[in-house]
Amino acid sequence: MDDIDQIPFNFDPRIGMIVGVMVGFLVFAVALDLTQEKLLRVLKRPKAPTIGLVAQFGILPAIAFLVGLYLTEAPSIALGLLLVTCCPGGALSNYLTGVAKGDVATSISMTTVSTLFSIILTPVLFAFWASLNSSTLAVIQNIRMDPQRVIMTLMIMLVIPVSAGMFLRAKRPDTANRIRKAVRLIAGIVFAVIVSIIIGSNFKSLALLAHTALFPVVLTFVVAVGLGWGIGSLAGLMAAERRAVAIEVAFQNVALAIGLGITFFPSLAGIAAVSIIWGIVHLTLGTGLALLWSRIKTK
């Protein structure tokens, strides 16, 4: 185990299940927005969402892999970067796209499709890129992961919430509309309280971990924004669409990353640190970027 993971990190494994359930509720709230009309919108206007998803799932994990390979000597930091970048977009990206005067329809479409694809792509991409780095591969091989536990966790955090949300939206749209905000608010508050407790009880450890994790996280986040904007520009997207793609590519579902990290890698402090620090970075730098764009007119 790397020296960074010797830093004491207080975490009660029983909290892992609670975090998993709360993440499931947050994903369920996102899935309540997965309407047939939004899926059809992707089919009718696939250019921007497709470009964004290629950047998000096809290119961003590769960038995180390179950052982890060359810019950090801690395998757990490298794994944390991979875990975050292999997760789908988060609901916060939809809100900040609106603040940034971006194309909210493109943002929602990307969140919709990436959430659906993440059921398969998140574990597959994480395992693939982790296996290409000898140091992260060694860590993964030394961790016993019960296949049944992996399946159960993915069911709780992704499969069941997505399926239940889409089913309720299709069968009872009025009910879905009534409970959507409440479910997201309650789950978000509970999740935030739990994460705050984890941060509060490990503040000194996280401060120490930040010395190693902060630069790789900030660099990967900035590159992700640039990637979304750049690939959108090359594809000839309008400014509002480029803003949406840039935000969506960089704003991952940090709640899911934290949930997966503390469930499967509770002994690797670096993974938890990266997930938490990424959340702080995208709340600060990301919000600042959205506010800056809000002052610039789109053409």
Image: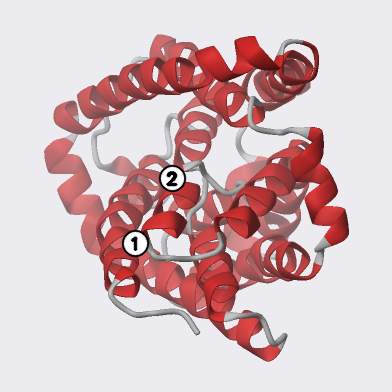
**Total of numbered circles in the picture?**
2
**Color style of the picture:** secondary structure
Q: Is residue 244 left or right of residue 145?
A: left
Tell me, for residue 246, which label it has, or none.
none
* Placement of 43 over or under 226, stated as above or below: above
Task: Decide which of 125, 96 is in the foreground and name it.
Answer: 96
* Residue at 73% across, 71% down: 51
Q: CA distance from mark 1 to mark 2?
A: 10 Å
Q: Which residue does the image show at 56% across and 63% down from the upper left? A: 103
Q: Are marks 1 and 2 in contact (CB under 8 Å)?
A: yes
| In front of the other: 17 or 141 | 17
Q: Of callouts 1 and 2, which one flags the residue occurring earlier in the amino acid sequence?
A: 2
Residue of label 2: 92
Q: Which picture quadrant has residue 233?
A: bottom right
* Local secondary structure at mark 2: helix
In the picture shown, does residue 199 fall above or below 28?
below
Determine whether, in the image, residue 31 is placed left or right of residue 98: right
Tell me residue 6's x, y (percent): 30, 42
Amino acid identity at mark 1: Gly
Q: Residue at point 65% right, 82% down? A: 231
Q: Residues within 10 Å of mark 1 (few under 14, many from 20)?
A: many
Quickly name the residue at label 1.
286
- Asked if residue 248 lies left or right of residue 145, the reply is left
Q: Quadrant of residue 296?
A: bottom left
